[in-house]
Amino acid sequence: MRHTILHADVMDGLRSLPDRSVHCIITSPPYWGLRDYGVEGQIGLEPSPEEYVQKIVAVFREAWRVLRDDGTLWLNLGDCYARSRSAWGLKAKDLVGIPWRVAFALQADGWYLRSDIIWAKPNAMPESVRDRPTKSHEHVFLLAKQARYFYDADAIREESHYRAPKGSGTGRGRYSGDEMGSVPSGGVSANPLGRNRRTVWEIATQPMPEAHFATFPEKLVEPCIRAGTSDRGCCPECGAPWRRVVEIERSDVPRYNSKSAGRRDCNYGDSDSTTLRARKIVVREVGWQPSCTCGCEETVPCIVLDPFVGSGTVNLVAHDLGRSSVGIELNEKYIDIIKNRWARGGRPAEALEVRAIW
């Protein structure tokens, strides 16, 4: 695994990367009007939200070139309130709606807007307001370059509990982790490995006094990397990710109908049987297969990019999950923070390269 931090302006850093060279982009740009990092050329201090959105779109137009065609972009953005009137017709105290304005602008620029994930913060910062609720969430948008892209849903499934509807004739079953799951006859079967990840993620913020009052939490980054890149890695020749192969077996099994008075047996051969059918589902992971025809049997780690890397959380999590990574950071102070975090975690110093591009 290789991990590179480019000390550069975001556009210069992106322009230094080859076409279609990264598998997944995970990032959180500076929010508009929130913080001055004291660095000339930083994004987030534009005179108007309109100019901010235009700059963000320009950045991800260049990121489009760097991202593989089957790759994904995971974009975290927070919102703010207007302080004065703007070209959008906003009034002072209006919620600007920056995340959605950026998302729709990227959609208009060619990106597929695939999902809006709510990052719910149980330890949200308090606010001294009395005329609205305290903000306790942010948005994470999942975007792609094309309709079909790499997404490993099985890597981030979550625990699920199923309660059969009253009168369905089935018992109450716990699906996640069970080899067998029961569903109403003719109903929709659940995956015993767990349900598909939902779009509300409750994850606490992680304070870091030397960097930011609430840095990118590792638990927020992890599912994005695991869904957006292959655990097995990618082809060393063309970069195509290997795909998980899952085998699913479904079969009907008898279930006694409690509404049948005095009946205690389950008889498949009896045409008058009132036995209901439940479905047994066995899901097995049988291995991995390449998504290309190069014929390589070995793999190399997939590459994750964060063009606004900040304190380096994406690089740290990528390393811990066996991926390679690239980060771009303008502020030299944050370069030092990344080095310190890398060393504190016991990660090999030789795996991290810092390179200036000016």
Image (cartoon, helix red, strand yellow):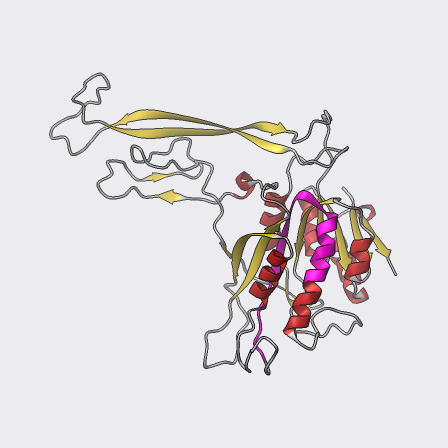
Q: Eyeballing the image, is 111 above or below 255?
A: below
Position of residue 211 relative to residue 155, above or below, is: below
Is 178 placed above or below 72 here?
above
Q: Position of residue 90 (x, y in %)?
A: 56, 78
- Magenta stretch containing residue 164, yes or no? no
| Location of residue 92 (image quadrant) | bottom right
Nearest the viewer among 343 and 46 is 46
The one of 300 and 54 positioned closer to us in this rendering: 54
State the residue at coordinates (20%, 31%).
257
Tell me where the magenta segment starts and ends, as one range. Answer: 57-82
The residue positioned farthest toward the right in the image shown: 358
Q: Could you tell me which residue is drawn at 34 percent across and 30 percent down?
A: 279
Query: Residue 152: image x %, image y %?
Result: 57, 40
Work out which quarter of the rendered image holds the C terminus and state it. Answer: bottom right
Residue farthest along the left direction in this orientation: 261
Q: Quadrant of the N terminus?
A: top right
Residue 30 visible to the viewer: no
Query: Residue 102: x, y in percent?
Result: 61, 63
Q: Is residue 19 visible?
A: yes
Task: From the top left corner, tell me how far across and down residue 3 is, in percent.
Answer: 77, 48
For residue 71: magenta? yes
